[in-house]
Amino acid sequence: MDKKEFRVLIKYCFLKGKNTVEAKTWLYSECCEMSTKRGERSGRPKEVVTDINIKKIHKMILNERKLKLYEIVDTLKISTERVHYIIHEYLDMRKLCAKWVLRELTFDQKQRRVDDSDQCVKMIKHNKPELLNPLHSVII
C-alpha cells in the first residue's frame, strides 16, 4: 500500500470519529500489517551535523578568517542553515569585522592574558625608579 492509499484510510477513520489509537488498531486489523516507521530513503543523509563536518568547517575558518559562509557551503555541499548552525552552536563563533572569531576567550587565551599582565607588572616594579624619573623619559 502506498502513501496516498494509507492517507485515504486515515482520513476515513477521522471522518468516522475514531481517535488515533482506534484508527491504528482498525488499520492493523482490517489491512495487512504495515510499519509506520520510516524506511531508508535514497539521497542525502538527513543529519549533516557530524564531527567530521564540524572539524572541516573549523579548519577552514582557522585557515581563512575572512571566509564567507557561501564559500563553506559550496565546498562542503551542506545547506547554508546547517553551516550557520555549526559555526554558531558548535564552534561558538560569530562574524566580526568580516572575520570569524570566537564569542568568548578559551581557557588558554584567558591564561595567556593573565600571564602577560603579570609580566607587565613585574617589569613596572623592577624598573620603577626609571619610569618615575621625568628626565629619563624625555625623548631627544
Image (tube, rainbow, N blue to C red):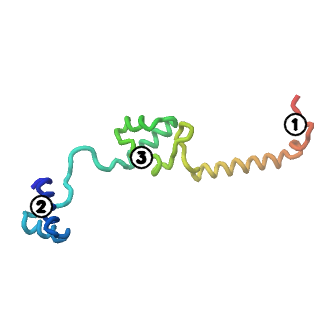
Pick whichever of labels 1 and 2 is earlier in the sequence. 2
18 w.r.t. 73: above or below: below
Residue that label 2 marks: 9
SS for dot 3? helix
Q: Quadrant of the C terminus?
A: top right
**Closer to the camera in the image, 128 or 79:** 79
Nearer the observer, disc 2 or disc 3? 2
* Amino acid type of the residue that numbered disc 1 sits on in the rendered structure: Ser
Percent across and percent down for residue 124 are 81, 47
Q: Quadrant of residue 136?
A: top right
- The span from disc 1 to disc 2 (Cα, nearest Å) is 91 Å
Percent across and percent down for residue 118 are 73, 51
122 w.r.t. 15: above or below: above
Pick whichever of labels 2 and 3 is earlier in the sequence. 2
* Amino acid type of the residue that numbered disc 2 sits on in the rendered structure: Leu
**Closer to the camera in the image, 13 or 41:** 13
* Amino acid type of the residue that numbered disc 3 sits on in the rendered structure: Ile
Residue 46 falls left or right of residue 81: left
Residue that label 3 marks: 54
| Residue located 36% across and 38% down the image | 76
18 w.r.t. 121: above or below: below
Residue that label 1 marks: 137
SS for dot 2? helix
| Residue located 50% across and 39% down the image | 62
Residues at discs 3 and 1 in contact (Cβ within 8 Å): no
**Closer to the camera in the image, 33 or 105:** 33
Nearer the observer, disc 1 or disc 2? 2
Percent across and percent down for residue 112 are 64, 48
- The span from disc 3 to disc 1 (Cα, nearest Å) is 52 Å
